[in-house]
Amino acid sequence: MQNSYRIINALIVNEGQIFPGSVQISKGIIERISRTPNESDVFTKDGYTVIDGKGKYLLPGIIDSHVHFRDPGLTQKADILTESRAAVAGGITSFMEMPNTIPQAITLKLLEEKFLLASDKSLANYSFFLGASNDNIAEIIHADPCQVCGVKVFFGASTGNMLVDNQSVLEEIFRCSPLPVVAHCEDEFTIRSNAEVMRAKFGEDVPIGMHPLIRSAEACYISAERAVNLAKKYGTRLHLAHLSTARELELLDNNLPLERKRITAEVCTHYLWFCEEDYSRLGAKIKVNPSIKSAADRDALFQGLHNGHIDIIATDHAPHLPEEKAHSYFKAPSGTPLVQHSLPAMLELWHNGKISLELLVEKMCHAPAISFGVVRRGFIREGFQADLVLVDPKSPETVDTSNILYKCGWSPFEGHTFQSKISHTFVNGNLVYHNGRFDESVKGQRLLFAR
């Protein structure tokens, strides 16, 4: 039986506003919102657990539209239970997971097997992308757009090697897909050419600082332009994953409201936090694809958030074991774990004046719900699912191995002290996380999409 809650005296951040108020939750739903901070005169009293949010901000649950939880087949690195625990501890109440697991989720049968895994394991709400390949167009065409978040197309080979390099297949995907097409855009020919130049110079011991020169800004732009041109040709609903360069912003339109955009884009937390100067300190811990690039690119990505070119902040959470990351450049896998620390990192950037709380919530909660058509989530609205996060902005916590929840056991933020801390996370009205304690008795739900 679900508990009923009243969250009182909080500062509610929602739909461009911050206001003192209270929220009442019943049967997994936001039952009532009041702009009266103290609930005593506006809410019924019997049967509700009262949580005092004094000094805290109440946000909609974060919707992370880009994660790799490695389940099935790579569970030595991560699995749906461990990473969903880390996610809810980081304020993420819903995630959309990528198909490059083992086996790769390139058939509807394999995709449904992942949904079944999540129904048994996940503390957060979930959906899974169907993977595109050079020969699975029939699977894509028969996917239910109300049940599946999207189809992932790797224009450049990444972890899992799901490269779609047949132009006629790409044309068919963009022409026929009933699902949003989410594109990983890096030009494979450019990357391979750059890699050969570096091999000729350094052999196999290429310095990690060469990563943004190998997986270059040019490689990103060439591929993203190709995807955008295909989307415009066929009127495809296209989402560009993990933008990492200033130049890619030239391909995007900021003159339309999000609801009307056919082409949207995301940036990930690490591109807003790190830059190429950090390779000397963190090495392969921040080797990700696309690569983290210059400080100027980072500044441009921030500007893209502010001016509407970039719609979503996601994580691209992609854990690997420490011993894998210790390999030489070409052998060290790309990816970094982020779901536990993305919201604290973005809140740190708010403390530093880089982003407002209202914009943070827009890009991490509202925009993913709008862009993907997520049903009744992403907002603090009466009648919506009670996916909510309480944040204490004055509760510092230093990231170290004692409090890292990722199965891989490490974070690129180790040693950093964040000023803000997530104290409570509600998923479908269930208090699944509270100051380090988890309730694993109730699992998350499959996301549905209004399309």
Image (cartoon, rainbow, N blue to C red):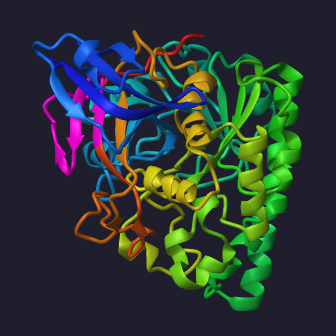
Q: Residue at x 46, y 50 (%)?
A: 343
Q: Residue at x 35, y 45 (%)?
A: 55
- Nearest the eye: 310 or 285: 310
| Percent coordinates x, y for residue 262 in the rendering | 77, 23
> Compared to 399, does 434 lie above or below?
above
Is residue 6 covered in magenta?
Answer: no
Using the rendered image of the protein, determine whether residue 294 is visible from the camera's viewpoint. Answer: no
| Percent coordinates x, y for residue 2 in the rendering | 16, 18
Q: Residue furthest front?
A: 41
- Nearest the eye: 125 or 223: 125
> Compared to 237, does 101 lie above or below?
below
Q: Residue at x 22, y 27 (%)?
A: 430
> Compared to 329, does 381 lie above or below?
above
Per the rendered image, the range of residues in magenta is 424-443
Taking the image as shown, residue 419 lies to the left or right of residue 355, namely left
Where's the C terminus, which quadrant? top right
Taking the image as shown, residue 395 lies to the left or right of residue 188, namely left
| Percent coordinates x, y for residue 147 in the rendering | 47, 16
- Nearest the eye: 373 or 322: 373
Taking the image as shown, residue 130 lies to the left or right of residue 46, namely right
| Percent coordinates x, y for residue 190 in the rendering | 82, 62
Using the rendered image of the protein, determine whether residue 252 is visible from the camera's viewpoint. Answer: yes
